[in-house]
């Protein structure tokens, strides 16, 4: 059974069919990328899957359970985690605290215990701290743990967001343009990180503009154009697909020829 | 480790100030100013949790102070409760009301939440002013003696009335500060601060944003209610002004001046706004003008509030 199944998903914004009839599946440990020209509906699709938007049509299921339009904090409990295209960092908290918030569900916080700083509450905080430090090490930010998050560089914030998303111990991770705005070195770091996470059995759904990155690490690619799925398959197949080439270059496939996306 | 030691340091400094300050007091009047600072500081600490941690505004928290105050005035008379129990009843009532009204109004954001809470505060002060047969109306109502001072006297601890209230309210402020500092670095506190910075990201990592906002609202209402009860018991008299719009605004101003996100800032803000009018009375006609000017200057030159700005200055702007 696939971990994530999306069927016939669609949403309209004031009469415009932003996304229509999109469907695909993601298996555990698999990296599936959603690509398409600007305005194709990739982020809208992400927002529907992650509960930020209510889809008008279609269904999303996680491990066989229908979770269409479920609020984000309940999806988090079911093991779905995400990052954002325009970073959503807790700017006024430290780098370490950002990741510690990611452990929120494992902490099972109790307000009264926290107010009185009971031994149980302190123990939970200490455990969270240790787990968060390990994650910061994994993304190479352990030396910045006590800095305020707003002082980090853009590329570092991208990695911090991934660390926070991983703190949930997700079964599926949605990454919305994790390499956008990053330089070549930072992109490569994120590339390794994503591959490494997938190897540990987490399913990954990726939206990314960096075609080299997508072609290199994806097991499977879904191509959107004007809100509809126009192609799907392995990286090699998709990059040769005439419909995909037309969507990207806006010319007849015969004239464009071969491997436009290679 | 670093955070927990700064927590203990804050508590230690606050306790030391409360203990040492009386040695410089020329008269009983200063004990009274001190007690007023502590009572205001307690309510403001609650608002630091609501405004500073969770990022939710309230312009009606004096309403909860009014509920706490009038519980101490009315419950002994009509229900025959001891004032201490009346205080607990007021706290429970405030918490219940905060829970009930918080559910619908905390869906609102920013200005809309401000206006909704403002409405609640005005409602409470109107009820207290208009139900004259029960509450005494705008003329106020007397509040019975707490009786704890007499009890302390029998065990040989002889304090003047002003000294007793200074110590008693000081203990409440210390306890309130301790709880707020605990909360700041706990799992719940992190969840609150996270939803302040980005609600969508907090939801995404599994924080039940609605529940946490409501918790902060109820908790801050409890602080305000206790502050109102203490004020009523200390003055042995209460008027609807305790629940009034001006008192709500005063509390929020103290919170922001002190530094909304900072627990010690609550005490600093309360101290500044409680003491300044007393100090400035020598200026007579210009008192309010200078007070307003000082508030504006603090906000212009210390936009994050007294305590955060000063501590950054001390650390050498790192």
Image (cartoon, coloured by chain):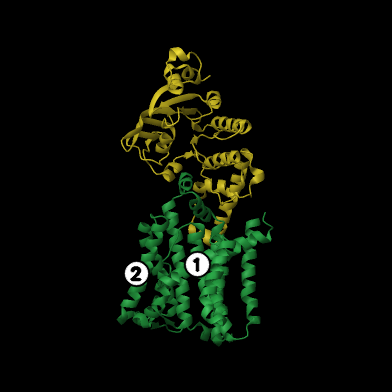
Image colour for chain A is: yellow
Q: Secondary structure at mark 1?
A: helix
Other-residue count near label 2 (Cα within 10 Å), few / some / many at <14 / 14–19 / ≥20: some
Residue A88, given in percent of the width and then of the height, sits at 51, 44
Q: Is residue A108 left or right of residue A17?
A: right
Tell me which chain the residue with mark 1 is part of.
Answer: B
Q: Which chain is green?
A: B
A88 relative to B190, above or below: above
Which residue lies at the image location 50% right of the left edge and 38% below the top edge? A85
Q: Is residue B312 left or right of residue A177?
A: right
Which residue lies at the image location 56% right of the left edge and 52% below the top edge? A92
Tag 1 and tag 2, C-beta contact below 8 Å? no
Q: State which quarter of the image contains the C terminus of chain B.
A: bottom right
Residue under label 2: B123
Residue under label 1: B253
A248 relative to A100, above or below: above
* Mark toward the start of the polypeptide (1 vs 2): 2
Residue B251, given in percent of the width and then of the height, sits at 48, 69
Q: Quadrant of residue B37?
A: bottom right
Residue B260, given in percent of the width and then of the height, sits at 53, 61
Q: Quadrant of residue A122?
A: bottom right
Q: Are marks 1 and 2 on the same chain?
A: yes
Tell me which chain the residue with mark 2 is part of.
Answer: B
Residue B144, given in percent of the width and then of the height, sits at 43, 84
Q: Which mark is residue B11?
A: none
Q: State which quarter of the image contains the N terminus of chain B.
A: bottom right
Other-residue count near label 1 (Cα within 10 Å), few / some / many at <14 / 14–19 / ≥20: some
């Amino acid at each position: 059974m696939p971990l994530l199944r999306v069927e016939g998903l669609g949403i309209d914004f004031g009469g415009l069919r932003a996304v229509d009839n999109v469907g695909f599946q993601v298996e555990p440990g698999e990296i599936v990328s959603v690509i398409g020209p600007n305005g194709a509906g990739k982020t809208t699709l992400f927002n529907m899957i992650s509960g930020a938007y209510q889809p008008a049509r279609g269904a999303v299921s996680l491990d066989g359970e229908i979770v269409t339009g479920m609020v984000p904090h309940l999806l988090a409990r079911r093991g779905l985690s995400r990052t954002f295209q325009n970073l959503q960092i807790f700017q006024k908290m430290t780098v370490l605290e950002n990741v510690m918030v990611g452990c929120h569900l494992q902490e099972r916080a109790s307000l009264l215990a926290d107010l009185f700083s009971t031994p149980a509450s302190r123990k939970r905080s200490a455990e969270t701290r240790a787990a968060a430090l390990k994650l910061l090490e994994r993304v190479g930010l352990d030396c910045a743990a006590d800095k305020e998050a707003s002082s980090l560089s853009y590329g570092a914030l991208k990695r911090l967001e991934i660390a926070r998303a991983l703190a949930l111990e997700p079964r599926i991770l949605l990454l919305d343009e994790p390499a956008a705005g990053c330089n070549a070195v930072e992109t490569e770091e994120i590339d390794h990180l994503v591959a490494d996470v997938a190897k540990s059995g987490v399913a990954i759904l990726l939206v990314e503009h960096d075609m080299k990155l997508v072609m290199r690490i994806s097991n499977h690619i879904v191509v959107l154009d004007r809100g509809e799925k126009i192609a799907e398959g392995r990286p090699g197949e998709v990059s040769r697909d005439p419909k995909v080439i037309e969507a990207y270059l806006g010319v007849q496939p015969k004239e464009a020829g071969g491997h436009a996306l290679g | 480790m670093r955070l927990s030691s700064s927590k203990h340091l804050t508590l230690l400094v606050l306790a030391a100030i409360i203990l040492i300050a009386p040695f410089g007091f020329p008269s009983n009047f200063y004990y009274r100013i001190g007690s007023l600072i502590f009572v205001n500081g307690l309510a403001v600490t609650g608002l630091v949790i609501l405004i500073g941690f969770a990022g939710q505004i309230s312009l009606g928290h004096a309403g909860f102070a009014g509920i706490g105050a009038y519980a101490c005035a009315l419950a002994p008379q009509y229900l025959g409760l001891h004032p201490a129990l009346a205080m607990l009843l007021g706290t429970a009532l405030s918490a219940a009301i905060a829970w009930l009204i918080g559910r619908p109004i905390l869906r609102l954001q920013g200005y809309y939440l401000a206006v909704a809470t403002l409405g609640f505060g005005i409602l409470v002060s109107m009820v207290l002013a208009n139900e004259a047969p029960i509450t005494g109306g705008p003329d106020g109502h007397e509040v019975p003696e707490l009786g704890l001072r007499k009890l302390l006297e029998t065990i040989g601890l002889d304090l003047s009335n002003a000294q007793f209230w200074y110590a008693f309210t000081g203990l409440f402020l210390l306890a309130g500060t301790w709880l707020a500092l605990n909360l700041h670095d706990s799992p719940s506190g992190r969840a609150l601060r996270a939803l302040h910075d980005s609600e969508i990201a907090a939801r995404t990592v599994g924080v039940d944003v609605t529940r946490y906002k409501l918790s902060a609202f109820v908790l801050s209402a409890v602080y305000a209610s206790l502050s109102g009860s203490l004020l009523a018991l200390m003055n042995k008299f209460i008027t609807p002004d305790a629940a009034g719009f001006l008192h709500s605004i005063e509390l929020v101003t103290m919170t922001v001046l002190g530094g909304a996100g900072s627990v010690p800032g609550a005490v600093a803000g309360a101290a500044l706004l409680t003491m300044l009018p007393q100090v400035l009375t020598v200026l007579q006609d210009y008192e309010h003008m200078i007070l307003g000017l000082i508030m504006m200057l603090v906000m212009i030159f210390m936009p994050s509030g007294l305590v955060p700005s000063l501590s950054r200055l001390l650390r050498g702007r790192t």
